[in-house]
Amino acid sequence: MRSAAFFDLDKTILAKSSSLAFAKPLYDGGLIGRSAVLKSAYAQFVFLTSGADHDQMEQMRAYMQALCKGWPVDQVRAIVADTLDRVVDPIVYAEAVELIADHQQAGRDVVVISSSGTEIVEPICERLGVDRAVGTQMAVGDDGTYTGEILFYAYGQGKADAMEILAAEQGYDLATSYAYTDSFTDLPMLEIVGRPVAVNPDAALRNLAIEREWPVLDFEKPQSMRSRDRAKVAAAGSAASAAAVALGLAWYARWHRSR
C-alpha cells in the first residue's frame, strides 16, 4: 500500500473560491445576470474574510443548484476552458504548487477534492498537474443541461467517503496519507488520514489544530503560475550557460597543459 496527499481546493490551493471566481466569465457568456455577479462577489468577500460554516455551505449549495438549472453543460465547459488561465492562474498559491510537487516526487498521488463542480475542478487540476480530481457532480438531463439535482456533494463527510472509495480502488494507506484543508467543515477528511494539516485555517480549525497539535501552514499571496514557469525556464537557461562556460574553461585548461 502507498500513501496519498489529499487537498481541498479553495483557500488551500487557490486564494479564492473556484466557483465564484468564474462569475464574470459566466456573465459574459450569458448564463447569469448582473445581480448574480454581485451576489457572487459578496459571497467571495465573506468566504475570504471569515470562511464558510455549515449553514453557509448549505445555502451556497441551494443557491448554486437553482442558479445552474438549465445551463448547457458543453457551454460551461467551453467557458471554463477559454478563461481558465486568466481566472485561475493569478490565484494559485506558490507554496501549494511546491507542496504538490514534493508529494509527487516522493511517489505519492495527489488528489484534489472540492465542493465546486467537476466541470470547474477537473480543468483546474489538469492545469495544476495533480493525479486525480473529485468535485461535486450535478445531474445532466437528456438535453445536455443541468437538471438542478446534485448526484454527489463533495463536502463534509462526502469528502471522507470519496477518499475511502479512492483508497480502496487505488490501494492508498490512509493511515500514512496526508490531508490539507482550510475549513473546519472539512474535519472528516482530516480525521480519516494519519497526517492532517491545516492550511490557512479558519478560526475554528486553527484552534482545533493547535489543540490536537496538527501542523498549521499559512500560505502567502498567490503567484502567477506562468511567471513561475518563465522563472524556471530562465533559471534553467542560466544554469545551462554556466555549465557550458565551466566545460569550456575545463577544456581550455586541459588543452593549455598539453601544450
Image (tube, rainbow, N blue to C red):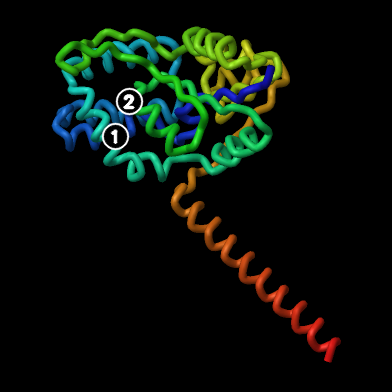
| Residue identifier under label 1 | 80
Whether residue 79 is situated above or below residue 54 in the rendered picture: below
- Residue at the right extreme? 257
Q: Give the x, y percent position of residue 79.
A: 24, 35
Q: Give the x, y percent position of residue 172.
A: 63, 16
At numbered mark 2, what does the secondary structure look like: helix, strand or loop? helix
User: Mark 1, residues whose alpha carbon is within 10 Å: few (<14), some, or many (≥20)?
Assistant: many
User: Mark 2, residues whose alpha carbon is within 10 Å: few (<14), some, or many (≥20)?
Assistant: many
Q: Label 2 is placed on what type of residue? A: Glu
| Disc nearer the start of the sequence (1/2) | 1
The residue nearer to you, when weighing 108 against 155, is: 108
The residue nearer to you, when weighing 151 against 36, is: 151
Residue displayed at 15% across by 15% down: 143
Residue displayed at 45% across by 28% down: 10
Residue displayed at 63% across by 11% down: 191
In-image side of 156 versus 137 (left or right)? right
- Specify whether residue 211 is in view: no
| Residue identifier under label 2 | 119
Dot label at residue 90: none
In-image side of 6 versus 16 (left or right)? right
Q: Give the x, y percent position of residue 108.
A: 63, 28
Q: Label 1 is placed on what type of residue? A: Val
